[in-house]
Image (spheres, helix red, strand yellow):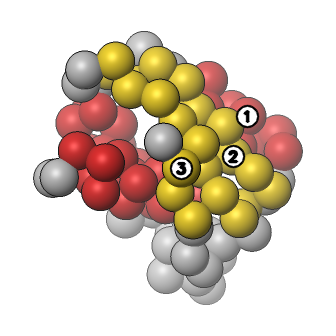
Amino acid sequence: MEYKTHGVCAREIKFDLDGDTIKSVEFIGGCSGNTQGVARLVEGMKVDDAIARMEGIRCGAKSTSCPDQLAQALKEATGK
């Protein structure tokens, strides 16, 4: 699945789900170390748990962040 981000440095998030589990995540653009870290931390995690942990995280003065955008992508993909 692909999600075009809004308001962050990463341009896009590519991810795969296996039912309600996150199989893989790849951020296109953004802060490489941080986005790789987020991606690895959520792989194998249940979608609902990932959304609960990441939704609402802000990056500096921005109203969103790469983790928040991943939560939005997961919500959109699962209809939550």
Where residue 7 appears, as percent x and y from the top left, is 60, 79
Q: Amino acid at mark 2?
A: Phe
Is 13 located above or below residue 50 in the figure?
below
Q: Secondary structure at mark 2?
A: strand
User: Residue beneath label 3, please?
Assistant: 2
Q: Residue 10 at what x, y percent from top left?
A: 72, 61
Q: Residues within 10 Å of mark 3 (few under 14, many from 20)?
A: some
- For the question of whether residue 45 can be seen, the reply is no
Spatial CA span between label 1 and label 2: 7 Å
As drawn, is 75 to the left or to the right of 26? left
Depth check: give the residue in front, 52 or 23: 23
The Cα atoms of the two marked residues, 3 and 1, are separated by 16 Å
Which of the two discs, 3 and 1, sits closer to the camera? 3
Where residue 51 appears, as percent x and y from the top left, is 31, 45
- Residue marked by disc 1: 36
**Residues marked 1 and 2 touching at CB (< 8 Å):** yes
Count of numbered circles on the image: 3
Disc number placed over residue 27 in the picture, else none = 2
Which one is earlier in the sequence, the residue at label 3 or at label 2?
A: 3
In front: mark 3 or mark 2?
A: 3
Which comes before the other along the chain, label 1 or label 2?
Answer: 2
Which structural element holds mark 1? helix
Q: Residue at x 42, y 15 (%)?
A: 44
Can residue 22 be seen at all in this image of the molecule? yes
Picture residue at 46% right of the left edge, 19% below the top: 23
Q: Is residue 67 left or right of residue 33?
A: left
